Image (cartoon, rainbow, N blue to C red):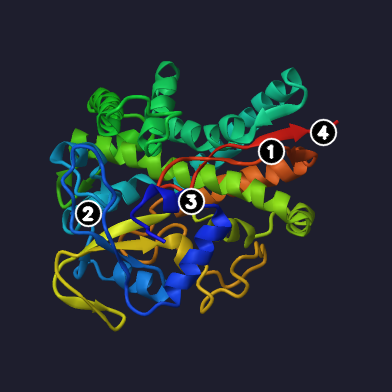
Amino acid sequence: MDLGTREFWELGWKERYAAFAELRATDGLPWYAEPEFPGFPPGNGFRVVTRHADVEEVSRNPDRFCSGKGAVSILDLPAEAHEFFGSLISMDAPRHTKIRRIAAGAFTPKRVGKLIDDVERIAGEVLERARATAAANGGEFDLVTEIAAPLPLLLICDMMGIPESRRDDVFTWSNMILAGDDPEYVTSENPLQDYLTAGAGLSGLMTELAASVEDDPRDDVLSALVHGEVDGERLTHQEIASFFILLCVAGNETTRNAITHGIWGLHLDPEARATWTAEPELPTAVDEVVRWASPINWMRRTVVEDTTVGDVPVAAGEKLLLVYGSANRDESVFTEPERLDLRRSPNPHQGFGAHGPHFCLGAHLARREAGVMFRRLLTEMGELEVVGEPDRLRSIFVNGIKHLPVRLAG
């Protein structure tokens, strides 16, 4: 059980969650050596935070546990990587506070209302294309590539004004960033260079579009970001580009995998599927799917000064991995945590991060996206059935499913 190795994260879900249960029952914060990565010197290792209360404590106290030294990587990334991937997730106050306030200001109630309308429209278009694909292939199609992946990325492209001619680029670059070192998406011998290339592509596209609305603003999120101010200060085009990369990664991945894991979970539990089919607007269902799926495996924090987590001493400079998939199955918080209980309430899951300044800014919209798609799948594609095993993403960071074969019966 070595969380610093790819082999651990490639375990079956049952084995992984059993290992997490063992860690939660173990005193202290276990230490592991850092994974080896070509071109990086060996690091000093990391400790894992697996209990719900401990993840909450670390997340709520950014003055003691910072994000600015790297939140999405166990390794300390080079400066050029932070240039592209150093958005809100990997920032600390005061810069984090400034950018989050401007970003939050871009999502006014009126604009959010329009985005919610857009979710319904895009979901309908996605389902129509999926039906056409099914009709051409004997009823079968890939749930991920036809439904779960397009929905969030198309919405992001709409809200940021990405022209149709550039959307294939956004899909390709986003997959490269999310891919870990999965050979389906990363084909070179230097994955870091692939990440940087994809980041540069997304950054360049957004910098170009941000410049285009400087003097000719539109009624969209991009224009609101470009012209938004906090205390007289605006975002730079690079900061907007980094925020866009965050949207493409975090804003895409949670929704994509919540939908895919959710359909897989309903396949495994016909009783849960019957419950949701009978009540397609069930208000507690989406949050339970996000808890059960835990689409992001972990985030990192770095200890700022000698302190404690719970009653465990930790030293300044130590790296902590907040393991959401473990916290979301903590028996002290969740009854029958392995069960997909669509009526679970309360449900203090950490699938959008734990509470604190880094709680997911787009959680409300992500819930809406997933809720709309599940409702429409259950009511308009009720005959949908899973016909194969999930093809999992080879990544230690994302609990991803690349492909899930399904069939429309009849």
- Sequence-wise, the earlier of marks 3 and 1 is 3
State whether residue 75 is above or below residue 329.
Answer: above
- Sequence-wise, the earlier of marks 2 and 3 is 2
Q: Name the residue tied to disc 4.
A: 409
**Three-letter code for the amino acid on which mark 2 is drawn:** His
Which tag is nearer the camera, tag 4 or tag 1? 1
Q: Name the residue tied to disc 2.
A: 96
**Cα–Cα span, label 4 and label 2:** 49 Å
Badge 3: residue crowd in 10 Å (few <14, some 14–19, many ≥20)? many
Q: Are marks 4 and 2 in contact (CB under 8 Å)?
A: no
Q: Name the residue tied to disc 1.
A: 388
Locate residue 369, reporting x and y percent: 55, 45
- Sequence-wise, the earlier of marks 3 and 4 is 3
Of helix, strand and loop, which one carries label 4? loop
**Cα–Cα span, label 3 and label 4:** 28 Å
- Sequence-wise, the earlier of marks 4 and 1 is 1
Locate residue 213, reporting x and y percent: 28, 26
Quadrant of the rendering where the N terminus is positioned: bottom left
**Cα–Cα span, label 3 and label 1:** 20 Å
Locate residue 216, reporting x and y percent: 28, 24
Locate residue 184, reporting x and y percent: 46, 28
Q: Most extreme residue toward the right, as rendered?
A: 410
Q: Which mark is residue 295?
A: 3
Q: Foreground: 286 or 17?
A: 17
**Cα–Cα span, label 1 and label 2:** 43 Å
Of helix, strand and loop, which one carries label 2? helix
